[in-house]
Image (cartoon, rainbow, N blue to C red):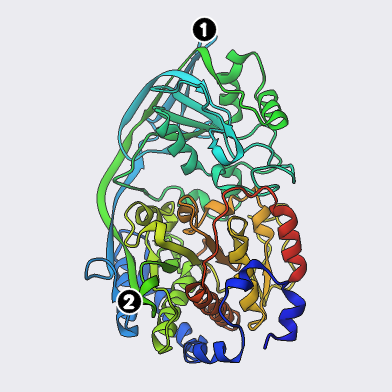
Amino acid sequence: MVSKLYRVVVPVSAWLLMAPAFGQDADARLEKGLQAIQATRMRVDLTYLSSDELEGRRSLEKGAERATEFIAAQFEKAGLKPAAGGSYFQQVPLVEYRMDRSKTQLTVRAAGKKQTYPHGPDFSGGFPENRSVRGGVVFAGYGITAPEFAYDDYAGLDVKGKIVLIFDHEPQENDPKSVFNGLGNSRHAGTRTKALQAYRHGAAAVLIAPEPNRKHLTNQERSARIPGSQRRSRFASQALSDSLWIPVFTVSDAVAATLLAATGKKAAELQEAIDRTLKPASCALSSTRAELRAVTSERRRGVTTNVIGMLEGSTPALNDEAILFTSHYDHLGKSEDGVYHGADDNGSGTVGVIELARAFAANGARPKRPALFISFGAEEQGLLGSYYYTAHPLWPLNKTRAVINLDMIGRDEAPSAQTEGLMEIAQDTSNEFNLIGTVYSPQYREAIEHENARVGLKINYKWERDAALNILFRCDHFPFLLHDIPSVWWFNGFQPDYHQVTDTVEKINFTKMEKIVRLAYRTGWALADAAKTPAFRASVKAEEKSLQAANQRR
């Protein structure tokens, strides 16, 4: 029998028509697994993962290796099968490097003048090998090719061998009626997405400029708000060794103005025209040439690890489909400031995935579809583990039906320097968490709300409308979205200890964390057991009203 609370909170939807029965019989099937989810055990696990012994779990360092050994051991004890050819480990080849800032530079020749910009405020970024790119410059608008919106900045534009200049983010981001995603980002707004588009069109390098008419901080300004970010910028960078692609650097408003002078228009005018008409303003910048030099001072190869275990489903006909539970185990390591313990980020999500593995394995009865439990490496370096997995999947991506990604599920969201003036945070978030990515699968959202009727958390969708902090593409669910897989980031939110040595275990709200893991268990079971799994929807045009309705229900 459906509860009265459910009848009040969630309307009948397409999801309910294909979901398994919701009532006492269904709960009885889940009971052993639900009882196996315990805050006390998660506290023990998280105390170890965030201890000084693991040295902040930075990828390519010993602490991260110890973390992978611990996770694999827990998967094995739970009874999961190894998913990587008889092993729980998928090796991820990386390059670690430091830029030689004295030699890395950009030289621009425009209107008969030559200007050189050293690595610094006007020209910044990195690339893991020495490379010099010289040639003409082409303005490619926002650098987006989006067939679902009938929008293409590269239409009729020859960028082969050229240096491409593009604006950050995407058109109409201040317009609630924007086809891209109303007031939020779509998957086309991310830097890596744009770099891949430029590479596919034959560009030799990319320069990304902040949108001149922006109503938010630049990425550099946003990062600078996080205490200690300048010191941490001196850490070595990492990249996937098998996808170096092309150099991508950021330039300032001043550099963009110099490059765009050949158009006879100001950068703000070009952006306004694109946003108003939703038509590209791309063009070759005649007589403008540039030389980009990327030089490294240090470079070494290494291997990090994704940890992966599998639990088979109960229905042979559906054993080729899977539901994924994911997290990342790595953090920032240590410095002169101390150990970056990473209890919330993301020891909490990793412990949550381990606990889910135990719960599914301990339950006895199993859902129809298999479940994969994955903890990725090198997320803090740019989602490297999850990008590698989606390029080398251990389960076919076209048979991966949904991803539940747990990252930072241990703390109560609180105002911080990073969010000040950019996002409103509720006064009491002790029973609240956020979902990011449901715009691409409303049925997935409905499944979570359906199951939450028995758990009682407050669900907030405010980050779905974020175009300032780039939340949509800052976590491991995002590479799966690029492959049209319903993928959602379960996220408690930021707080002042984010990326600080003070992100420690005693600050974790284990009561709420247990509830989130229980909801993930219920939702994952429902997705794995449903007659039909949630669909992916590339176009998110109508999502603003849908999100408002969802927030009203919570």
The x, y position of residue 253, in whole percent, is 61, 29
What's the residue type where badge 1 is placed? Gly
Q: Earlier in the sequence, mark 1 or mark 2?
A: 2
> Residue sitting at 67 percent across and 29 percent down?
274
Q: Is residue 493 visible?
A: no
Measured in 3D between alpha carbons, the distance from the residue under mark 1 to the one under mark 2, in whole angstroms, is: 61 Å
Q: Position of residue 269 (x, y in %)?
A: 70, 23
Left or right: residue 94 versus residue 267 is: left
What residue does disc 1 label? 112
Q: Quadrant of the C terminus?
A: bottom right
Residue at point 70% right, 72% down? 12
Quick one: 24 or 425, which is closer to the camera?
Answer: 24
Please name whichever residue, 206 or 87, is drawn nearer the observer in this view of the structure.
87
Please tell me which residue is depicted at 55% across the width and 47% down the height of the picture.
Answer: 187
Which residue does the numbered mark 2 point to in the structure image? 70
Tally the marks.
Answer: 2
SS for tag 2?
helix
